[in-house]
Image: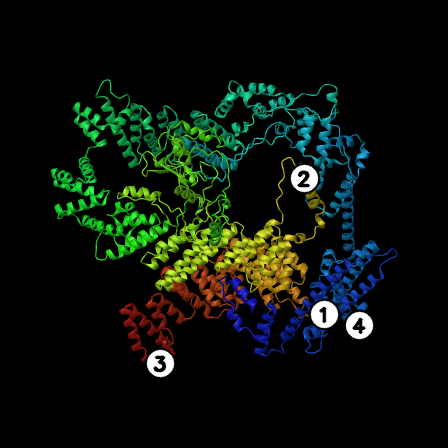
Amino acid sequence: MSGRNELHSRLHPHPQSSLIPMMFSPPESLLASCILRGNFAEAHQVLFTFNLKSSPSSGELMFMERYQEVIQELAQVEHKIENQNSDAGSSTIRRTGSGRSTLQAIGSAAAAGMVFYSISDVTDKLLNTSGDPIPMLQEDFWISTALVEPTAPLREVLEDLSPPAMAAFDLACSQCQLWKTCKQLLETAERRLNSSLERRGRRIDHVLLNADGIRGFPVVLQQISKSLNYLLMSASQTKSESVEEKGGGPPRCSITELLQMCWPSLSEDCVASHTTLSQQLDQVLQSLREALELPEPRTPPLSSLVEQAAQKAPEAEAHPVQIQTQLLQKNLGKQTPSGSRQMDYLGTFFSYCSTLAAVLLQSLSSEPDHVEVKVGNPFVLLQQSSSQLVSHLLFERQVPPERLAALLAQENLSLSVPQVIVSCCCEPLALCSSRQSQQTSSLLTRLGTLAQLHASHCLDDLPLSTPSSPRTTENPTLERKPYSSPRDSSLPALTSSALAFLKSRSKLLATVACLGASPRLKVSKPSLSWKELRGRREVPLAAEQVARECERLLEQFPLFEAFLLAAWEPLRGSLQQGQSLAVNLCGWASLSTVLLGLHSPIALDVLSEAFEESLVARDWSRALQLTEVYGRDVDDLSSIKDAVLSCAVACDKEGWQYLFPVKDASLRSRLALQFVDRWPLESCLEILAYCISDTAVQEGLKCELQRKLAELQVYQKILGLQSPPVWCDWQTLRSCCVEDPSTVMNMILEAQEYELCEEWGCLYPIPREHLISLHQKHLLHLLERRDHDKALQLLRRIPDPTMCLEVTEQSLDQHTSLATSHFLANYLTTHFYGQLTAVRHREIQALYVGSKILLTLPEQHRASYSHLSSNPLFMLEQLLMNMKVDWATVAVQTLQQLLVGQEIGFTMDEVDSLLSRYAEKALDFPYPQREKRSAFSLSTDSVIHLQEIVHQAADPETLPRSPSAEFSPAAPPGISSIHSPSLRERSFPPTQPSQEFVPPATPPARHQWVPDETESICMVCCREHFTMFNRRHHCRRCGRLVCSSCSTKKMVVEGCRENPARVCDQCYSYCNKDVPEEPSEKPEALDSSKNESPPYSFVVRVPKADEVEWILDLKEEENELVRSEFYYEQAPSASLCIAILNLHRDSIACGHQLIEHCCRLSKGLTNPEVDAGLLTDIMKQLLFSAKMMFVKAGQSQDLALCDSYISKVDVLNILVAAAYRHVPSLDQILQPAAVTRLRNQLLEAEYYQLGVEVSTKTGLDTTGAWHAWGMACLKAGNLTAAREKFSRCLKPPFDLNQLNHGSRLVQDVVEYLESTVRPFVSLQDDDYFATLRELEATLRTQSLSLAVIPEGKIMNNTYYQECLFYLHNYSTNLAIISFYVRHSCLREALLHLLNKESPPEVFIEGIFQPSYKSGKLHTLENLLESIDPTLESWGKYLIAACQHLQKKNYYHILYELQQFMKDQVRAAMTCIRFFSHKAKSYTELGEKLSWLLKAKDHLKIYLQETSRSSGRKKTTFFRKKMTAADVSRHMNTLQLQMEVTRFLHRCESAGTSQITTLPLPTLFGNNHMKMDVACKVMLGGKNVEDGFGIAFRVLQDFQLDAAMTYCRAARQLVEKEKYSEIQQLLKCVSESGMAAKSDGDTILLNCLEAFKRIPPQELEGLIQAIHNDDNKVRAYLICCKLRSAYLIAVKQEHSRATALVQQVQQAAKSSGDAVVQDICAQWLLTSHPRGAHGPGSRK
């Protein structure tokens, strides 16, 4: 059924489902299909459903089930035998001198008995006939089932068959792997056969060969046993007793391997020949190995060669290496098949060594070159490389280079003497694109860093653009390593002969060699040659000689010399001035940079050093020249050039000239604005105009440039008012405008330059506000003196009421006392109540509320807050700044009472916002946020420990001191702008007491103070580190960063906002050195002791302050300055934060703010100045307080949020406890995805234990962590630990036969193990001995011992065994099979497929597809056949492979596979498809007739095989079956198709036939296509008679509708207008003898349907050829010839005539022919009377 479907699918390529054919198949077919696929469970279901217990397939099912069980038990038995052999081999029982140990003999006998009984049990289980007997194991099964006649030749063969013996024989040949089991099964088969023959009265000794030459089963069994016995006898003769004990005796092979050994015939000679050659090869290899391992004298290779050359020719030929090499070549020649073109690698290698040895010896000899030199062991040359040998001859033996080059060229050896000279005497120069690209980016980074570094010293706050190259991790200025040349000083120096030889070959090469030659330090003389004894040894050239030669050679290459000069010019230093180019470059360490540029390995260091030297020396032109010369191919150098130009602008006196080449328009403009004050006026005007003209300048920057230009133009005009001018330059004029603007304005007005005065007024305006300011200051002065009457008079004298209002309001905004504020408020409400805004009314009301709050404060402290009475919010803020939390609590309560229904400019929401802001400041870090650079942490980890330290603080001796470190701090950039001569002293160490610190002349401005992030140690004592509790303080006098211990004093500082201000002890001592020190009072002592005590206690309780340190003002600008400087000395303090937030009205908002503060605090865990453990404790305390606030507010839904954050803090605590450097913040790990990223970062940083803990703590899947840990163990080589880690994350698949390679995790493990099997061992360039040993090992392995390498040797590797462990435990069968296939272990893959009974899909995916894609299909076929010669076990896999190839349309591979399967029927079908596929004409088909011949041959072979095995019922299931009749019918079809093809091919060649229809019709199609073939044959010849015979055979053989075929042919003749051939067709049809009488009329009537295209004469002739009159009438009616039809109709017999005339009448009526219609009607009326006269009246 399946065969017919496959044939139909081949003939009709459309894919069809096999479901419907299976539904209509009989139950026996379903049962057989289940058995073939191995689905025994489904087979039992079919057996039960259809009650097929009595069918033959039921017995087959029983046998197959039992057979599978027996195979498994047999494998277990063999496994036990192997274990016994291994145990016996490792036992301590040794053989005595007289023979084998008795105990060992007893053990061997017992083991043999166990093997015998185990095998017997297995075979008895398979052949057991008790219970349900299996029909096919009965003795008469084949005779009873095969329908063979008694006299048939196969009768005797079938009678000799014994099914039990054959079953045992099948097990021995296909399922056994060990020799012992094979032998036992063969003996079982012989016993079964003997018993079977004895029951029939026959003996196996008397079984003769069949008369027809057919070998029966007994003969085959005898032949195999005979070969085995011969092999045993030969083994016993060649193996000694000791060898037999070690593993000799029976061969360690199976019957399958024995059969392969007996190829090409099953005879003893083949076995003996193969064994003899193998033994001889092993002996020769062993002898050669021993000869090579003989101890050689420790002499150089050349000396050893000279000693061998001194021997005579017989002695050289008698050398062991020479003899064994020749024997090896002979032995390999015997094993090579005759006529093969296999390459003789061994002979080629030996010839190369001998030739090279001869050349080396001839170069040393004085004899002629043609004298033959022979050595016994030329392999001694392999101790050194060829280049080393040649260099030794040139420089040690001083062989002339010309002679050596001539000898090498004579022998066609590819060794370049110039190359050897250059490589030995010169530094290697190699171009490397990857190195160039890498060094290009590194050069950009280094030069950019150097330029930025120097620019940062020259430019304070000016930002520079950085190069776009990738930033490297190294610091080029700090981590640069000096380059050390890899050359050895003992290498040969350049000699005059070598240089002359190089000149003769290439002068340019000689020039480069002179440049690259290293300077001669010491010439080594390892040995004395005869030249030295005679005084002829050549002396190497000195450095001066090489330089002179190089100089002369460079004169011949001016372009090269110019290139060298241009490249060397930026790199030369001051010491190289005045010397020639050749002297400087020859032997120079940095020559490779000049020649190769960025290809040189030292280019980066050389260029960086030269660039840095030019910057340090301020040689700007050299730095720019270096970037131009070596940066031609480097993009994005503009930023570096701009940085150099910026330094030149800042440092050069005429720096404005360097602004024009700057490419960055913004940078150029900013530089011009920054340094314009240094340059002359004309230059400033020019550069500003140039900057403005650039379109790339931003609008904002252009506006600044234009303002500056306008200002300078004003100064230019003012300077031109007087001659000579009053001011020497415009800078002096500007200072005067600032210091004394009235003088300048008066001078301008005196010159009557009103427009200039207006312009000057834009720069220094005198607005109306100045007058208002004057009145305001006067009014405030009077009010401060309590002269209210004069103040009222002043206000009345102001003429403008609006100005008066403004003066009063501004004065109220700047009052200093409560009385003044009340006066101004009363005046405003009295005189300007209607004009006051709502804002002003609120301010007055605020003054009232502020007075109330002021009264709540203690009386002695009211003066510090009275100036803020008009702004209660400022008053509350000042309370919070000074940590007066108790007073602030009363103030907040007062505000809550007074703000009800009042509008004073702020609400309680603003109060809450203020509380939230200062609660946040209570947690601020007192340090700059920086990356963590060290594992710095305090010794305190908890609040409890902090309290212990506070208790210890009472004793000053117990206080810990900070670690001291003496170093010289760098000068702060803020002070560098203050021109003070005392700043240089800071560069000296503080250990010199004579050096007194001198502060700058004027106190620095705030922006000039030393930034917080620049220093981490006190700049005064240089000991105290700034930490979380040891804060930074700025000295207001010098601007330095000092600790609290070094800034205990205060004094008045000029220009400082708060006075007295905090200063450092050094500034205080310097400014008060002339004032005698007063004895410290008790309060100062208390204050001093308070400063010395540690501030840790402020973390756990709300600190108290006795004095006001922070004071606010009513001016917002001043307040902003105070706020910018403000900080809590005790921050971070959780208690202070919570105490402030307790004053807040909204507890829920406070809880969320605490959570936000925790997130902010978590960002500082990576700071080196932070105690991370303390921060986590603070965060926990804040979260607990937030939780309490939520409970207090009844906000239960936020409790889970607090718990979530607490768990995240626990995670951070884990990281902190583990000293993890990159601790994330809470925001970064808030989401599960963020936690996952954290876990991944831990794993990437190899914190595997920490990653597992974090995953467990956060509830993440730990699979990834365990897998990463396992991979790390795997990479470290700890395979045992890797297995333990992987066991926690890897799981075996649910279905081992699924079509994938297992989980991705297992694939990663296997991929890594596979990549680690053969690690790459890097060798140094001069490590030639290791290279030669590797070459020798490779040659010995690949060339000499290729035949003895066992298949699958790679599986002995530990890593491959580890791969198999993971694959077998955690992956699928497909992954295991793919692994075997990848590593060329195809046999293991096939055996695993069989053992696991994997489905065919696994075979296709894992074995078959890789095999045919890699061209190893023949290897696969050989292995399949070697494992199972019958291919029975591969049946389902081969069928699946065929279906796969058919689906892929790989028909060539399919045909090859079908031939391998010996499936002749399907192979014939494939040949037919090859014949008809894509053919467009029979000309093409004629060229492919060979495929039909092949198909016919396949069918013939199939017939022979079926006739040969007709008596046997058991046949292979996977080969297509067909009856002999069907095969014969198909062969006839093939023969007929060949005849048709030859005929039509001939016709197409002659031009008589053309095929136009597609697809091309053949006899392999349906009946319609076959009829087309018949028509083509009839019409394709010269005439119809030419091909009618073949067409008639087609019609007869296929029983086609002949009449229809003839009609189709006739119609085509009409279309071709071949009317004469229609008559020939009619003649051939009538003469065929098989046509009916009416066939001719039918053909003609069919032709007349196309009557319109037929000429009248031809039409009439065709009608006349019709024999029947009725048909003629029909013909005339078809042709619309009604009158002719009428005339014939009336001549017929009356009844027939009436019917015919009626047809004519109907046709005339349809066509509208009234005349014929009337004639017919008249005849019908008149024909009745005449009808009575009889037929005779028609005459």
Secondary element under disc 4, as helix, strand or loop, is: loop
* Amino acid type of the residue that numbered disc 2 sits on in the rendered structure: Ala
Q: Residue at x 19, y 28 (%)?
A: 757
In this rendered view, identify the residue nearer to me: 2 or 881: 881
Using a 10 Å C-alpha cutoff, classify the residue at mark 4 as few (fewer than 14 neighbours), some (14 to 19) or many (20 or more). Answer: some
* Amino acid type of the residue that numbered disc 1 sits on in the rendered structure: Val
Locate the C terminus and report the quarter of the image it occupies.
Answer: bottom left
Query: Is 19 drawn above or below residue 1206 in the view shown?
Result: below
Q: Position of residue 1139 (x, y in %)?
A: 37, 55
Q: Tag 3 or tag 4, which sits nearer the N-term?
A: 4
In the displayed structure, does residue 187 sit left or right of residue 560? right
Q: How far separated are the C-alphas under marks 4 and 3? A: 99 Å
Q: Position of residue 1604 (x, y in %)?
A: 46, 67
Q: Tag 2 or tag 1, which sits nearer the N-term?
A: 1
Query: Is 741 drawn above or below residue 1101 in the view shown?
Result: above
Q: Tag 2 or tag 4, which sits nearer the N-term?
A: 4
Residue on which the image places disc 4: 202
Q: Residue at x 60, y 26 (%)?
A: 518
* Amino acid type of the residue that numbered disc 3 sits on in the rendered structure: His
Residue on which the image places disc 2: 1330
* Amino acid type of the residue that numbered disc 4 sits on in the rendered structure: Arg
